[in-house]
Every structure is written in structure tokens, then in C-alpha cells.
Image: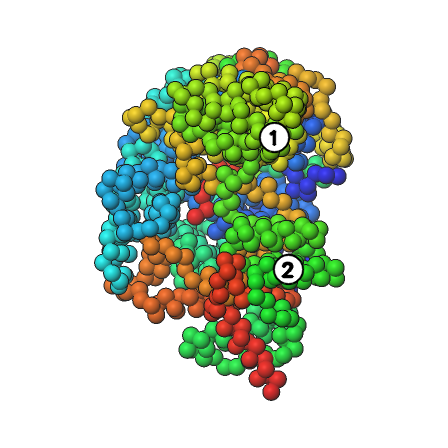
Amino acid sequence: MLPTSEQQALIEHPISSKVFLQGLAGTGKTTAGALWLQKLILSGIPPHQILVWTPQRALAQPYLDALRQMDQPVFSLLNTITLGGLARRMVDLFWPAVSRVVGVANPDLPPHFLTLETAQYYMAHVVHPLIVHEGLFSSLTINRNRIYSQILDNLNKAAIVGFPHHEIGDRLKSAWIGDVEQIHIYDDVQVCVNHFRSFCLAHNLLDFSLQVEIFLQHLWPSALCQGYLTRTYRHLIIDNIEEDPPVAHDILRTWLPEFDSALIIFDENAGYRYFLGADVESAYTLHRSCSEMVHFSDNQVQSLPITHIQSGISRAIASLNRKPEPSADLMPEDIRAGLETPGEKIKYFPAMVDWVADRIRTLIDAGVPPGEIVVLAPFMPDVLHFSLANQLDALGIPHRAHRPSRSLREEPATQTLLTLAAVTHPDWNLLPKRINLAFALMQAVNGLDLVRSQLLTAYTYKEFAKENAFPLQPFEVVPPATRDRITYRVGERYDRLVSWLHSASQEDPQTLDFFLNRLFGEVLSQPGFGFHNNLESGNTIATLIESIQKFRWAVGAQIGPEPFTIGKEYLQMVQDGVIAASYMHSWEQPDEDAVFLSPAYTFLISNRPVDYQFWLDIGSPSWYQRLDQPLTQPYVLSRNWQEGDLWDAEDELSAAFDSLHRLSLGLLNRCRKKVFLGMSELDVRGYENRGLLIRIFQQVFQQAQKGAA
Amino acid sequence: MILPDDFVFTQSNLQDYLDCPYRFYLRHIRHTRWPALVVDDAVAFEERGQIGARFHRLLQQYLLEVPETRLTDLAAADPSPDVLNWWQDFLINVPPWLSGIRWVEATLHAQLAGFHLAAKYDLVLAQPPDGLVIFDWKTSKKRPRKEWLLNRVQTRIYRFILCKSGSALLKNATVEPEQITMQYWYAAFPTAPISLPYDARAHEKDQAFFTRLVNEIGSRKADSFFRTEETRHCRFCVYRSHCDRGTQAGDLAAFEDEELENETDLQDLDFEAIEEIEF
């Protein structure tokens, strides 16, 4: 595709330029960035000297694609980076140079980099005793895992916003205007933060916040690290700078003068990751470090009706927020072309899902590629995903989902492995319930259905075995009539498995990950067992084992002094829901031509326009309300928060309008043709919701009627 | 062709193909992970890999001018005595060879017959007047024969890609094969590096070899990546149960006798693939 005139004008700038490029989503900025990259390389700059910086790694993909699509040979590879990646890399590389000044107890030993899982684990380890023995958070009735994750969230915010972690509690308290109990909660947060940080320093554990702090405070200012970075990278391309936190902007502000060229791309009306510290105002100040400012205004995505609907939504939000705007050019034909709602009122949620599936089928029958359709909701809970997936499966429509926090422990394959591990280690006192074992055996042994598996375990499983006795009996203990029913062939497989497990239980203790490697390789993936030739399950189990392995590496001997079994600890944490929320590898989610089912924000961040969008559950306040997070507050912990200000109901409402404005306009900037509004009177939980988004669309319809009049 | 457009051939995936086309298919095209053990003594195997990785990191830090005294502190505190011994041997023997311009952990890329090839180097050194030395650090306990190393995919592809794409490092000056030497340094044999100079004849042979190889792989259909007939490879292959080629992993000593190396992680091309938390 030929460049637009705006893109052409950009790439005609000299390669020594430092350009700040801004514009709305859909105006072709990233494409221009990719063209800029190609221009740099065509001018003889080796790719390894070019740094592409994005808030998430996936957003660098267009640049990697652009490099591959070049006709001329490319002699090296492009470097793509995020703030987190840069901090992690530099701390790893230059650790010995700073380890004596960062406060760790063992500066001559390498650091242990914590993952999300292991950080959550250690947080639980540190905070749980404080809750149980010292009564912290006694007035809170939320799941403990949410307590741990919100404390981590606070630490991370302090690091990426750039204030000391010991000020978290005071900042939160200073903005609070409610009952005193909440003040105690914020005090408790600070106690936990302090304990966790001390624990990490005592054991060389680096969570995300500590990695970022060490990089910012010790490495970035050092000649060694900064010299390395400035020598290595001579040209910079930043995309979606508005989604990065302020400390990223601080670094870039000081780094920019060192580059031979720079292109900074700023998406107007964005900043969707504000709850993760994105700071639009801070990002925008980087234009002062550039010699040129370029603005793109030609939308390459939207049809005119979508543009008009977008104006209508903007006006409706302004009106509801008591900041009226001039009337938009919205006409009934815009609504007909760009918006579709169910013909009749739909009362129940399943009927709405039926309607969505039916409309998707109609689109695909008309020749729309499935990849040009997204189905969006504020969240994508299992029940919604399951209902949609079932409907689309029934219609033979390919679909894919992106649910970032998919939990491994929900996968049958991982449940099977962990259940068999628990059975093999009765001394852990984590023996599974009979039904769970029956389910695991059904997965593990070919030819065993749930009914026969339950029959089998009724005779062979001693759920309450004494004195750490191995709890599984051989097939021969099953009465003959039942053996006939189960079949001897299945019984022989069962015996092979049990015999292997029994032998393993007699051996010296081995690490859980290697135990599972062996169980999988020597038994469960052999002929006659459930994972033989089951490549998908292989991938899932590999992810589980990787999670355990990282847990083992990170936990090691840090936790003491009592005798401690890492495998047991892992299993316990999985059962408690603290860990095993591992992310699936990106390559396990092929980017096929399929209908995309996604939370709305995830779709926004993926930065990919489509022809058709379905917005579900639009009555839900989740489209604009903050998550209920009693231990943290993204606005108060942002750099823009003025010390001494109070967060009140008006701020909350204003934030909701702002959030809804950004979200709805951002989605429409990524929609070429039409939005389908999935509305039912009762939502997925059976509640009647009449949130702001419904009222906004009612106003949009009224505006169109007025336009016609 | 079932190779994706963005597929990059490396020494490790080409070695996989040469060992077993089906393993290449499963691992690099289907991205199937099969969580069985590579060798029986998984603990020792993992430990050796980690010791090697820590030592490589020390050398990388040294080359990036992290103070030597601090690195010695870390080597001395390392739980494995091998690391300090290797480090001291490195300091005695290697620095005199390191004069010149350094590219540490450099990755070069080349195109061949419409395919992409890449190599990640521990160190490339430009030495006057126009020499280019590829250093590769090895922590395996055995020092292989020179002839074996010469035929190794790593030696061939590292020298070949540097010849084709070294201009990216040298401000677009072309690189002749005779400028290149590959230098293997075995930490357990610190005074006896193995030096493998390159020449035009070897370059021509490599060009023909890699052209044939990538074309062969690129033209295969999914069902023609056959299982190897050399079943000795299956002992150390995680897919053995999937292929019905055995139950238990081969033993670690035999793995080392075969001169195989537990260094695949270090040769991973994607420097960014380290665990990164996207907050």
C-alpha cells in the first residue's frame, strides 16, 4: 500500500531528525513508524543500532514485520524493548557493579528475579502471618490473594511513578475522606510493603518494583550502564509513548539527546493503561525534546458514519458530564450504517449471545473474514467466553480468545498431573478427594470413563490412608465383577501407572518438576495413556512444569528454617489460588483468521483495527467504573496527583466519564464499519444494569432523530 | 511451504533438523513442547547448565567492563568451585587475546535463497589489520577434536554469517573469508584454545551446504518431516515417547560422550525472551 500524503511527508524528514508524531488512533502513525524504520535501514543504518521502544512487546510486531518485508538484505536484527525489559536486562548485566549499594544482604551472589507468580507467593509468605497473628486488614472481607496483588500493585506504582515505596501509605491516606477504618487499612498496606521489601533485600529477591528502582536509581545514572546503552543504540523509535509510565519518560528525556535520530509516536485521546501507571501528560512533554512536531489527522480506518457516531458519543458524554458541546452531524442514516441493536428487546443474557452469534454468522456468510470481527466486553469471564465459544463452535466459526490471566490450574491436564503428584506424596497431607482422583485417572488412562474411574477408585483409593501410606491399591483388589466392567486392559494400564507412582514414592525425594517430567515422559505420554500423541496437553503440562521450575529456582532455600518441601509448597499455593496463574505463551495463541473474543481494554492495547465490533453487556458499569481495590488507588498514586488534594465522589464520577470517553472513542477509532450493541435487560449474573453507556447510546439515538428533524 | 515467513534458521534449529527432521518440525514449526527429560540425571544436567550460564554471564560482564574485582567476588561466592577456577584461568589466559574492537553478544542476520539465517556470537573481535575473530566460550568437560568442530553446524554457520553480514559491524566494509577465525575456548582446557581459520573454499562449501539445507527444509510438507533412522539421537530427545522410541531418558555420561552440549539456552537468539514482567 502506498504511503498517505501525511506519511510521505514524515518520511521525507532527514534521518537525523528527532520527530514527535501525534494523532488519533487510525491515522496511520504506526505504519509511518514502520516506513521510518525502513528508511533508516535503506540509508545504511544497521538494524542492531535501532531501538524500538513500546509499552508492551507485542506492540513492536509491526516493526519486526516491516524489517522482514524489506527487499534488500538485512544484516542484523532489530532490538525491541519495554521499560520492564530494559530494567531486567540492565540489572542482570550490570548487577556486580551495583549490588553493594542497593541494600541486598548478599551482594556477591546473583539476584533472583521474581515473576508475577513468585512475587505473589513471597508476598503471601510475608503478609499471611501479619494477617493471622497481628490482625492486619481485619476489617476487610476480600480474598487474601487480592490483598497480596494490590500490595504488589502499590509497590510497582511507586517504582514506575517514581516516588519512594515508604510513602505509599501516607499518599493514600492523605487523599482519603471516608471512615477511619480505611486509614488503618492504608497503614497496614505500608507495614506489608515495608516487610516485603525488607524480605526481598534480605534474600536477593528482585520483584518488578525493585528491578525498576535499581535500574533508575543506580544503573541509569552510572557511566557504565548509560555508556553501554548510548554506544549500542543510535536510533530510537517509540510507539504508544502515552501508555508508558512517567519514569520511562524521565529516562527517555535524558537519553534522547544522545540518539542520532528519534521518532516518538503519541496517540491522542489514549492512555488506556492509566490503571497501570500510563501517564499521558508526562508523555506529551517529550515533544520538547524533539526538533520537529508532526500531526496526522486523516483517519485511515473509520467510515463516515462511524466518525459521526463517535462525535455523537463524545457529545453525549459531555452532556451527561454537564459540559455540553456543539451538536454533532449525526443523522439517522449514520445510525443505520454504523450501529445495530437487536430488533426486539432481549430480556435474558443467553438470548443476547444467540443474537451475537447469529449476526456474526450473517457477516461471515456475506464474505466478512472472521478476523475482521471482535466481540468485546468490559471483562471476559469464563461463563461469557464459554457461551460465546459454544455458539460459535456450533456454527463452525473459528474464534480465539485473549484472557491474560487464564489460570493453569483450571486445565484438566495440569489438574491430572498435580493430583497424581499429591497421591505419590502422602506425607504432604494433600491427598485429593476421591472424585478428583477419579477425574485425574480418567484423563491419565485411556479407556477409562468417569463412571468406571469412580468405580475403580471406590475400591483402590484409601483417601484417609494412615501414616503416610501410599494410598493406591492394585487393580486386583477390585471385585471380579467390577473388574470385568472396567476391563482388564484398562486395569493393566492402571496397574502400570500405580506401580510407577508407588516406586516413585519410595525413592529419595525429587523436585516436583522433574518428578512430573518423568511421570509424563515415562508413563502418561506412552501408548495406552491419556497424553500419548496429545500435543496440546504436552504444551499445557510443559507450561505447568516451567512454572514449578521457576518457583523452585526463586524459592530455593529462602524460606526456612523449618523443613520445607518446595513441591508441597507449590501444590498448597495452587490450591489456595496464590500461584499457577501462569500466562500461556503467545505462540500458543496463533494469530489466525478468527473472531476475537476479548476484554475491551485488551483489544484497545493490541492496536489493531477491525471492520466490525460487538460490544456486549453495555448496561454494565464495568465499562467505566474502577475495579474495587480497597488497598490502592491509581489516580492518587499517579504523578499528576496534587499533594493535599482529596479524592471525592465528584472526582470518581469525573474519572468514570473520562474513562468511558477514552474507551468508547478508542474502540471506534479502531472500527471501520459497524458496531453491534449486545443488550439484554438482565446481565450474565441476572442483574438489571442501566449504566452510563446505555444512557449515552440513548442520547446518540436522540441526536440522530433531531438531526433528521 | 509450511515454514512461516518470519522463520529464522539458527545453528540450534538446523542441528535439530540434521539430527531428526521430525524433531525440527515439532519444536520449530509446531512449537510443541513435550515435557519429558533430556537425560536421566536431571538435577546434575540442570546444575551444569546453570553453572555454564553463570560463567558465560561473568565473561559477558567482563567484556562490558564491569570491574574485574567485583566479578572475582561473584566468582568466589559462586556455589560451584568450577566457576572460580574457570574465571581465574580465563583471567590468566584470555585477556591478552582480546585486543581490538569488541562486539559482545552480537547477533547477525543473513539471507540465503530467500530464507533468513541468524547467529548470536559470544564475542566478535576486530583485530588489526583486518582480522575478525569469533570467540565462543565452552564449559563442557570434554574438548572435542578439531575435525569434529570444523564440521559442526555452529562453526560453519557462525563463520558463514559473519562473512556474509559482517559489514553490519564494519561500517559496510565487505568481509572476506580469510579475515575470519573461529576460536573455541574450553574453560576446562584454558591454555589450549581451538582456532579454526576460514577460507574461500570453506565458504563456498558452506554456501552450497546451507543453500541445499534451507531449500530442502523449506520445500518439505508437514508430513514429510520424517523421524530419524539414527535412533541413538532418540535417547536424548524429549519427544521419544511421542515417537514410541523409548521410555526413559539417556544417561548423562553418554550425553557427554556424544559431545553434546547443554547450552541451548545460551544460544537463544532472542535476548528479550528473558522473563519480563509487563506491569
Q: Residue at x 46, y 38 (%)?
A: A580
A198 relative to A415 in the view: left or right: left
The answer to which of A666 and A445 lies nearer the viewer is A445
Callout 2 crowding tier (Cα within 10 Å): few <14, some 14–19, many ≥20: some
**Which residue appears at 50% of the width and 53% of the height?**
A238
Q: Label 2's element?
A: helix
User: Residue type at mark 2?
Assistant: Asp
Screen quadrant of the N terminus of chain B: top right
Q: Nearer the viewer, residue B72 or A376?
A: A376
Q: Is residue A534 above or below residue A264?
A: above
Q: For this rendering, which residue is in front, A661 or B2?
A: A661
Chain to which the residue tagged by mark 1 belongs = A
Res. B8 mark:
none
Q: Which residue is mark 2?
A: A354
Q: Residue at x 71, y 22 (%)?
A: B228
Q: CA distance from mark 2 to mark 1?
A: 36 Å
